[in-house]
Amino acid sequence: MTYSVLVVDDEPNIVLSLEFLMAQLGLEVAVAHDGEAALEEIARKAPDLVLLDVMLPKCDGYEVCRKIRTNPTLKDTKVVMLTAKGRDTERERGFAAGADDYITKPFSTREVNERVRLYLNEKNASCST
């Protein structure tokens, strides 16, 4: 089974980097450059995991995360926020919105890979029980 990841960020260099990393893991990758496009892509094809920036045009990452969490068909979708906003209050806000994890930029590619593998392995384990 091939897992799918939606990369949501408005910075082209970060999108390119994450797209490459996820493809290296053998994942199907989709991209959105703003919050509205992310929600449209999610409605089109629900991803297994979303790598979500907080500061996005049109609809911020917190709102995208809340909308994912209020949709029962997306209950198994993992959300990892990737953002430059690293203060504790911002992290708490991300978790309150329903994020599974919160990684601050600049991020370690190894850390992102490890977290993505962790969440997709958890998803795989819950599907087989």
Image (cartoon, rainbow, N blue to C red):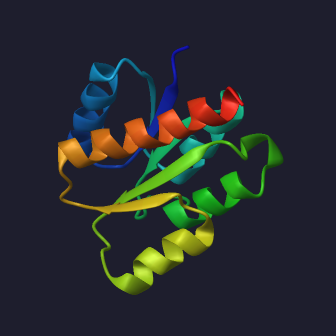
Q: Residue at position x 79%, y 40% from top? A: 73
Judge whether residue 115 can be spotted in this image.
yes
- The quarter of the picture where the N terminus appears is top right
Please provide percent x and percent y for residue 6: 48, 36
Decide if residue 64 is on the left or right side of residue 103: right
Whether 41 is drawn above or below 92: the answer is above
Q: As drawn, which residue projects farthest toward the front? A: 129
Whether 13 is drawn above or below 96: the answer is above
Q: As drawn, which residue projects farthest toward the top? A: 1
Please provide percent x and percent y for residue 32: 46, 39
Asked where in the image residue 98 lies, by quadrant, the reply is: bottom right
Q: As drawn, which residue projects farthest toward the right? A: 72
Q: Residue at position x 26%, y 41% from top? A: 12
Using the image as rendered, state which of residue 31 and residue 120 is in the foreground.
120
Asked where in the image residue 101 lies, by quadrant, the reply is: bottom left
Using the image as rendered, state which of residue 12 and residue 90 is in the foreground.
90
Using the image as rendered, state which of residue 65 and residue 98 is in the foreground.
98
Please provide percent x and percent y for residue 102: 40, 62
